Image (cartoon, rainbow, N blue to C red):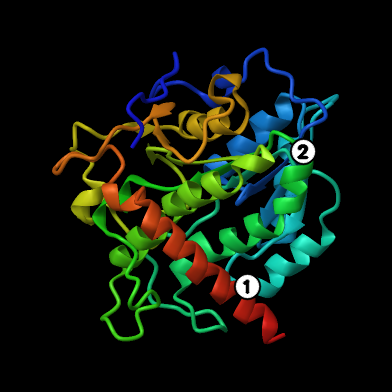
Amino acid sequence: MPDNLVTTPFGAQTTAAEILAGIDLSGRRAIVTGGASGIGRETARILAAAGAEVTIGVRDLATGATAAEEITPAGGPGTVRAALLDLADQASVRAFLEAWQGPLHILVLNAGVMASPLERTKEGWETQFATNHLGHFALAAGLHGALAAARGARVVAVSSVGHVNGDVLFDDIHFERHPYDPWAAYSQSKTANVLFAVEAGSRWASDSITVNALNPGRITSTRLGRHIGDISNSPSSFDATSTDVSWKDIEQGAATSVLLAASPLVEGVTGRYFEDCNEAGPHRPGVRRGVAAHAVDPRSAARLWRISLDMVEAAAAKV
């Protein structure tokens, strides 16, 4: 954890539009996964409104195309297009990578699932880890050349305060021996998002690529919580009465993603974890804020990178 935390004039109630007010992203190319709905859609909309050429990665191309048309700014110069991308399917990730051409300035790893029932991919991977981490890992690693070509690219990994509930279960990542717990699986996948930012930030610094993770806050009216039912009956990690939780609308929820993706205020900052548009301090027990020590451990970050690379390469070799 750095001694001096990065701060900005913005906070929990800042909107994504306010973050980029007066900023011109013309000529920049961006990818936002899960960009057809929720904070991903708002992130894509605001980047395009600032002039960026945005591709939203979506599982349903028809739905994605409709969303892209709806959020493309009238008169340009920004544009939005949809491309098929199922993060739980490594073949889909590879197809997306094969189709991408040219430099990439902004990559927002936004899509995710939360507390879903036990499901496995065709590789046998637990679906939350496969979607939230491995799919994004394969995508980002595959786009490394495009990011390096942009000279100053930014990668943004959307994590969650839920990461504080658990580390990566390195001895049984896919719950093959341990009883499956949907919240434990979610927590480890969100910890993995932060560990990815730590390791990628270190590995890719010489390529002028910055990589940061964030907690967007508790967002009203998104599909992320579709597996948990009534929030009042959910675990304490989603306690609606907590005074230390920032409840936000979608416009506010996308703000930290947009800050890390394009604001000059965080230029050159890498390998860190943000919340409410500022770098987060260490997590304290009993408080639903901050970054857990296990999520920024450089040894764990390097270990996870090696394991993830082995998994992705093994999956590709079987094709």
Picture residue at 77% right of the left edge, 26% below the top: 51
Picture residue at 50% right of the left edge, 84% below the top: 124
The one of 187 and 238 positioned closer to us in this rendering: 187
The one of 280 and 241 positioned closer to us in this rendering: 280
The one of 60 and 83 positioned closer to us in this rendering: 83
Residue 255 x, y percent position in the rendering: 51, 29
Q: Is residue 144 above or below residue 171?
A: above
- Determine the image quadrant of residue 263: top right
Task: Give left or right: position of 197 versus 65.
Answer: left
Gap in Å between the C-alphas at discs 1 and 2? 27 Å
Q: Is residue 214 above or below residue 231?
A: above
> Mark 1 = which residue?
89
Picture residue at 25% right of the left edge, 55% below the top: 165
Residue 152 x, y percent position in the rendering: 69, 33
Residue 275 x, y percent position in the rendering: 39, 33
- Determine the image quadrant of residue 153: top right
Picture residue at 75% right of the left edge, 52% below the top: 145
Task: Judge the density around disc 1: few (<14), some (14-19), many (≥20) Cα neighbours within 10 Å.
Answer: some
In the picture, which quadrant includes the C terminus?
Answer: bottom right
Contact flag, marks 1 and 2 (Cβ < 8 Å): no
1 vs 2, front mark? 2
> Mark 2 = which residue?
150
Q: Is residue 26 above or below residue 190?
A: above
In the picture, which quadrant includes the N terminus?
Answer: top left
Q: Secondary structure at mark 1?
A: loop
Q: Secondary structure at mark 2?
A: helix
Report the amino acid beneath label 2: Ala
Report the amino acid beneath label 1: Asp
- Does any portion of residue 191 appear in the rendered image? no
Q: Which mark is residue 238?
A: none
